[in-house]
C-alpha cells in the first residue's frame, strides 16, 4: 500500500478501527460466564536470567549467562484473570461476567467441574489452567562503539479451558504464547512481567470473542479549501459532513472525470466506516469503471487492493453476525 501511495500523491492515509471475529464461537445461549484460577504462581527462582552479549561485529556475537535470578512478581494469575475479564466485557457478548476465585486450590478437574458450575450458578466457566513466563535481561555491549544497552525479553504462555453447563459442548482448550521486548536504560523487571502477562490475556481473549483492530485506509484529498474542510471533519470524526462535501464534488462533475472517480472511491470509504460494506463495494466499482476509461493505472492499483479488503471484510462480517446473533 505504501508503494502505491507513493505514486498517488493525492491520496492521504488514516487509521480506522474495525471489528474482527474470533477463531472460536461461544455456543448459542451462553450469556453468563465465570472466570476461575487453576494455576499456581510461578516460583521466584524460576524463569529469570541475565545474559551478557559481546557484539564485536554485525555478524558476530558472544553470549554468556551471567546469572539465574530470583524475582518476586505478585499476583500474575489474578492480573491475567482481570485482563481477560476486561476484554470479555468489551466484546459485549455476555450479560454477566464474574471473576470467581483467584486461588489455585482446590484443584479444578473433570471430576468436580459439574459441581463447580452448579455452585457458581453460571452457564460457562473459563479456567486459567496454567500461566508461565520467562524473562531474559541482556546487557548488549557493542565493542566497536564501546556502548552498552539493556534489553528485556519476556515470553509468556497461558493455557485456558472453557467448560459449559450441562455439557452442551465439550470443553474448549486453547494456548496462547507471546513475547514482549523492552529496550531502555532503567528496566523494572517485575512491572514488565506483569505487563507481558496482561497482554497475553488480551491476546487470549481474541481467541474466543470478537475484537477491534487498527487498519490503514486511503482517501483522496487536495490542497483546496473544500478538501481542507473535509480533512478537518475527518479529524473530528464527523464522517457525515465529510461525505456531504465529497458528494457535492461528485454531483458537480457532469462528465465521468478523474475527480468524479476519486469522490466515488472516497464514498466507498465512507460506507465502510458506516459498516455498509456492500454499498461501499458498489461505490468502489463505480470508481473503477471511470478509472479504467482514463487508463489510470496507479488509481486502479489502489482500487484493486481496496476491493480485496472489502470483499474479505464482507466474508468476515458474515462470521461476526453469526457470533453476535448466535449469542
Image (tube, rainbow, N blue to C red):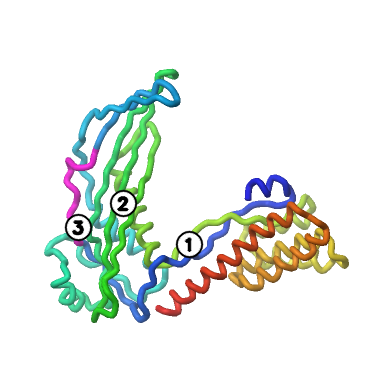
For the residues labelled 2 and 3, the Cα–Cα distance comes to 13 Å
* The stretch drawn in magenta includes residue 41: yes
* SS for callout 2: helix
Residue 6: percent from left, percent from top: 69, 45
Residue 307: percent from left, percent from top: 64, 63
Q: Which of marks 1 and 3 is nearer the N terminus?
A: 3
Residue receiving disc 2 = 197
Q: In this view, does 41 lie to the left or right of 12?
A: left
Crowd rating for badge 1 (residues with CA inside 10 Å; few <14, some 14–19, many 20+): some
Q: What stretch is highlighted in magenta?
A: 38-48
Image vertical order of residue 224 relative to residue 167, above or below: above
Q: Which of marks 2 and 1 is nearer the N terminus?
A: 2
For the residues labelled 2 and 1, the Cα–Cα distance comes to 20 Å
Q: In this view, does 193 lie to the left or right of 296?
A: left
State the residue at coordinates (32%, 43%).
154
| Count of numbered tags | 3
Residue 39 circle label: 3
* The stretch drawn in magenta includes residue 302: no
Residue 120: percent from left, percent from top: 21, 75
Crowd rating for badge 2 (residues with CA inside 10 Å; few <14, some 14–19, many 20+): many
* SS for callout 3: loop
Residue receiving disc 1 = 212
For the residues labelled 1 and 3, the Cα–Cα distance comes to 28 Å
State the residue at coordinates (76%, 60%).
262
Confirm whether residue 96 shows in the render.
yes
What secondary structure prevails in the magenta region? loop
Residue 319 circle label: none
Amino acid at each position: 500500500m505504501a508503494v502505491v501511495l507513493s505514486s498517488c500523491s493525492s491520496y492521504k492515509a488514516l487509521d480506522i478501527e474495525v471489528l474482527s471475529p474470533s477463531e472460536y464461537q461461544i455456543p448459542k445461549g451462553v450469556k453468563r460466564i465465570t472466570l476461575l484460577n487453576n494455576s499456581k504462581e510461578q516460583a521466584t527462582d524460576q524463569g529469570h536470567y541475565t545474559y551478557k552479549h559481546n557484539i564485536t561485529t554485525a555478524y558476530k556475537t558472544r553470549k554468556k549467562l551471567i546469572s539465574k535470578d530470583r524475582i518476586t512478581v505478585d499476583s500474575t494469575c489474578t492480573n491475567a484473570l482481570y485482563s481477560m475479564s476486561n476484554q470479555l466485557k468489551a466484546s459485549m457478548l455476555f450479560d454477566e461476567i464474574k471473576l470467581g476465585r483467584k486461588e489455585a486450590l482446590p484443584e479444578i478437574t473433570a471430576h468436580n467441574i459439574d459441581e463447580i458450575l452448579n455452585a457458581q450458578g453460571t452457564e460457562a466457566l473459563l479456567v486459567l489452567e496454567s500461566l508461565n513466563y520467562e524473562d531474559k535481561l541482556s546487557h548488549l555491549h557493542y565493542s566497536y562503539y564501546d556502548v552498552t544497552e539493556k534489553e528485556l525479553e519476556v515470553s509468556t504462555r497461558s493455557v485456558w479451558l472453557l467448560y459449559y453447563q450441562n455439557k452442551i459442548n465439550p470443553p474448549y482448550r486453547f494456548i496462547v504464547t507471546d513475547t514482549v521486548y523492552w529496550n531502555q536504560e532503567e528496566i523494572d523487571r517485575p512491572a514488565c512481567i506483569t505487563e507481558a502477562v496482561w497482554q497475553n490475556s488480551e491476546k487470549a481473549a481474541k481467541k474466543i470473542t470478537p475484537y477491534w483492530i487498527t487498519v490503514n485506509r486511503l482517501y483522496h484529498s487536495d490542497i483546496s479549501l473544500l478538501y481542507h474542510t473535509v480533512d478537518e471533519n475527518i479529524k473530528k470524526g464527523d464522517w457525515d459532513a465529510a461525505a456531504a462535501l465529497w458528494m457535492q464534488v461528485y454531483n458537480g462533475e457532469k462528465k465521468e472525470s478523474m475527480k468524479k472517480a476519486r469522490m466515488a472511491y472516497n464514498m466507498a470509504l465512507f460506507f465502510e466506516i458506516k459498516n455498509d460494506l456492500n454499498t461501499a463495494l458498489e461505490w468502489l466499482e463505480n470508481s473503477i469503471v471511470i478509472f479504467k476509461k482514463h487508463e489510470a493505472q496507479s488509481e486502479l492499483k489502489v482500487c484493486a487492493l481496496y476491493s480485496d479488503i472489502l470483499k474479505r471484510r464482507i466474508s468476515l462480517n458474515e462470521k461476526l453476525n453469526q457470533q453476535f446473533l448466535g449469542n
